């Protein structure tokens, strides 16, 4: 008997017949449903409680159910990728006070594509030419305090970095070769020129500006703050606090520059960005994640974080020799942070040993080192996991007491 015939028969048999009487084998119904796979467990991949933060190596953040459902539903239909980007870009731009926007393959991709758009404009010959920048303005001015590894996203296009430190040096560095002025938001305190002055000088000289604010929400207002300040391009990571797909990001800003950036992005080829593909599911998921993030109760969320931090701090600070301190990073990962330190003459363990024991425990827990102590963040913890973290850290500290 075929499976469909078995199922038909089951619907018309009186209660008490069929499977119970042995007419229909139980195995027939077992085959009708597929057991849910735990693929991570099946592959032997360690999962953990994330008390460390939205680090790329730790797969950043977890998507909300609405985002996952959007991705699942998006996977069931075909659509033209450019149309998906067009409609989603319009919505993102509206939410973030920008002229235009596009979903990219992470913030790094936003930097590369945005830079490419500045270099080429709408000239398809220049698009195909990159990273050969012959005949193009290709110098990017960067403050010394901002000149770290992320500039490689810009130089991947063929652009070159011109480092400056003061306003006087900036004015002197501007020339007919200057393509753009780049600002790394998380390193703003390390620079001598702040946002408003940076933008004002650029506008005076009619030079495009780009700001990298990858992990710089919360506060949620940062999503439109830098568009309102007048930056021409704003680059954001989608998979951190916004909790979109980890491999997604947002490039937003001037309409003409976004249009130019998209010439170097899929589905087009013959360009430097062909490998930076974002599928329709990620584009849709990124939009839903952003929309949810903007509309959630951020004050209530902050109070929840403070409560979780407080419960962990109280649990461990009662141990002799242990001290705790709560702080909030000024720019990137701007959420409550708990620093735990101990007197190693009383508690015979190092932070490395403690981290290893937490990692190898059950459940596995990830925290971050800070000097001789550890940092704990709570904004990526699931409901109730703060109690698990508090219990395990306390256990390990007590077990190490002299």
Image (cartoon, rainbow, N blue to C red):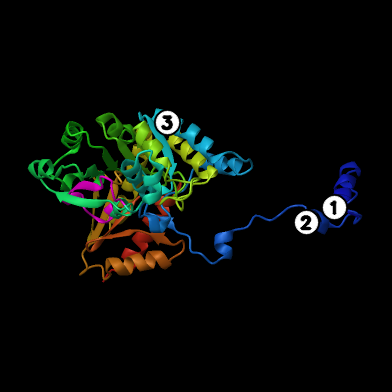
Q: Position of residue 387 (x, y in %)?
A: 41, 52
Q: Position of residue 3 (x, y in %)?
A: 85, 52
- Position of 6 with respect to 306 (left or right) is right
Q: Which residue is mark 1?
A: 3
Q: Which residue is mark 2?
A: 31
Q: Which residue is mark 3?
A: 295
Q: Label 2 to label 3, Cα distance in Å?
A: 43 Å
> Is 296 placed above or below 250 here?
above
How would you rate the neighbour count of disc 1 (Cα within 10 Å): few for under 14, some for 14-19, many for 20 or more? few
Which comes before the other along the chain, label 1 or label 3? Answer: 1
Which comes before the other along the chain, label 1 or label 2? Answer: 1
Viewer-closest of 153 and 396: 153
Q: Position of residue 220 (x, y in %)?
A: 34, 35
Start-end of magenta stretch = 133-151
Dividing the picture into quarters, in which one does residue 196 lie? top left
> Is 127 placed above or below 291 here?
below
> Is 347 placed above or below 161 here?
below
How would you rate the neighbour count of disc 3 (Cα within 10 Å): few for under 14, some for 14-19, many for 20 or more? few
- Residue 317 lies in the magenta stretch: no
Q: Label 1 to label 3, Cα distance in Å?
A: 47 Å
- Residue 150 lies in the magenta stretch: yes
Find numbered disc 1 in the image and state the secondary structure of the residue it sits on: helix
- Position of 135 with respect to 298 (left or right) is left
């Amino acid at each position: 008997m075929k499976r469909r015939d078995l199922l038909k028969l089951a619907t018309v048999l009186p209660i008490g017949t069929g499977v119970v009487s042995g007419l229909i084998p139980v195995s027939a119904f077992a085959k009708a449903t597929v057991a849910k796979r735990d693929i991570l467990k099946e592959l032997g991949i360690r999962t953990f409680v994330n008390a460390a933060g939205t680090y790329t190596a730790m797969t950043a953040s977890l998507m909300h159910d609405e985002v996952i459902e959007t991705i699942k539903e998006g996977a069931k239909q075909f659509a033209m990728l450019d149309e998906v980007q067009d409609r989603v870009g319009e919505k993102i731009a509206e939410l973030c006070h920008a002229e235009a926007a596009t979903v990219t393959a992470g913030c790094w991709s936003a930097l590369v594509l945005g830079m490419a758009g500045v270099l080429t404009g709408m000239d398809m010959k220049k698009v195909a030419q990159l990273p050969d920048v012959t005949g193009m303005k290709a110098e990017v001015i960067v403050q010394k305090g901002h000149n770290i590894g992320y500039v490689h996203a810009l130089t991947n296009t063929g652009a070159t970095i011109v480092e400056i430190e003061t306003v006087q040096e900036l004015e002197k560095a501007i020339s007919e070769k200057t393509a753009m002025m780049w600002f790394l938001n998380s390193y703003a305190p390390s620079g001598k020129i702040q946002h408003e002055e940076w933008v004002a000088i650029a506008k005076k000289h009619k030079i495009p500006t780009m700001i990298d604010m990858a992990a710089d929400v919360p506060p949620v207002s940062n999503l439109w703050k830098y568009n309102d300040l007048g930056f021409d391009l704003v680059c954001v990571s989608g998979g951190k606090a916004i909790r979109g797909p980890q491999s997604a990001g947002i490039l937003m800003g001037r309409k003409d520059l976004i249009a130019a950036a998209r010439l170097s992005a899929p589905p087009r080829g013959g360009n430097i960005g062909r490998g930076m593909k974002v599928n329709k599911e990620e584009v849709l998921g990124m939009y839903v994640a952003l929309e949810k993030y903007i509309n959630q109760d951020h004050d209530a969320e902050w109070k929840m974080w403070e409560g979780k931090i407080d419960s962990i701090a109280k649990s461990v600070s009662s141990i002799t020799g242990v001290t705790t301190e709560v702080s909030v990073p000024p720019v990137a990962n701007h959420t409550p942070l708990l620093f735990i330190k101990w007197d190693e003459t009383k508690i015979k363990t190092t932070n490395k040993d403690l981290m290893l024991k937490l990692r190898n425990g059950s459940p596995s827990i990830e925290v971050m080192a800070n000097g001789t102590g550890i940092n704990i963040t709570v904004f990526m913890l699931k409901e109730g996991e703060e109690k698990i973290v508090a219990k395990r850290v306390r256990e390990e500290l007590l077990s190490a007491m002299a």
